[in-house]
Image: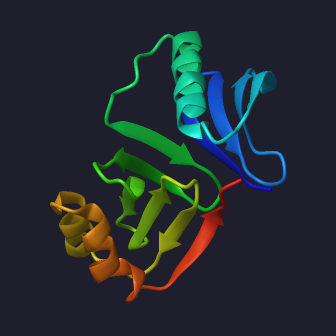
Amino acid sequence: MHTVAIFQHANVAAQMITGRAPRFEIVVDGQVAKSVPATRRWQSEQAAVLDEAAELAGVVLAADKVVVRDARMATKLHKVSSSFIALIGYRAARRELTVVFKSGHAFIYTDVSLAEFNKLRTARSVGKAYNAIVRKVKAGFEIAKAA
């Protein structure tokens, strides 16, 4: 089981819990205020939890960015236009690329240059660029599995 924070502002957080009973939670002042099971409709469930958490925190979410923080990653993730990949992010200090797939799987790839990340981010087809630049070339490890 992994806990991945998908939103944090002041005393309000939204998190994704992976494992046998995947779910999204809204946490206020360190206490779980709401828990929503993650189903096959996880994207809409995640969006609803993010919106509710943002409202509780009194902020508006940018449409193109989600911030993810956990012990292994503190990466700003950007939504991409792809039928395969949901979010990508880059951590320059560690040369790490984070890729979150629409299936719910998430990977961190190591030894990725900023130039390679920018090629992926700006590619006409993010999926094809991922296959060419990252998938078969870079070492990676899974940090989240689909339910």
- The part of the image, by quadrant, that contains residue 38 is top right
**Residue lying at 31% horizontally and 66% vertically, measured from the top left:** 127
- Residue 88 placement, left or right of 35: left
Residue 55 placement (x, y as % from top left)? 53, 11
Residue 112 in view (yes/no) = no
- Residue 100 placement, left or right of 12: left
Residue 124 placement (x, y as % from top left)? 15, 60
- Residue 132 placement, left or right of 97: left
Q: How many marks?
A: 0
Residue 92 in view (yes/no) = yes
Looking at the rendering, in which quadrant would you find the N terminus?
bottom right
- The part of the image, by quadrant, that contains residue 128 is bottom left
**Residue lying at 45% horizontally and 63% vertically, measured from the top left:** 98
Where 134 sits versus 69, above or below? below
**Residue lying at 45% horizontally and 62% vertically, measured from the top left:** 99
Residue 71 placement (x, y as % from top left)? 65, 57
- Residue 136 placement, left or right of 82: right
Comparing 35 with 43, the one in front is 43
Furthest residue toward bottom = 137
Residue 39 placement (x, y as % from top left)? 69, 39
Where 32 sits versus 42, above or below? above
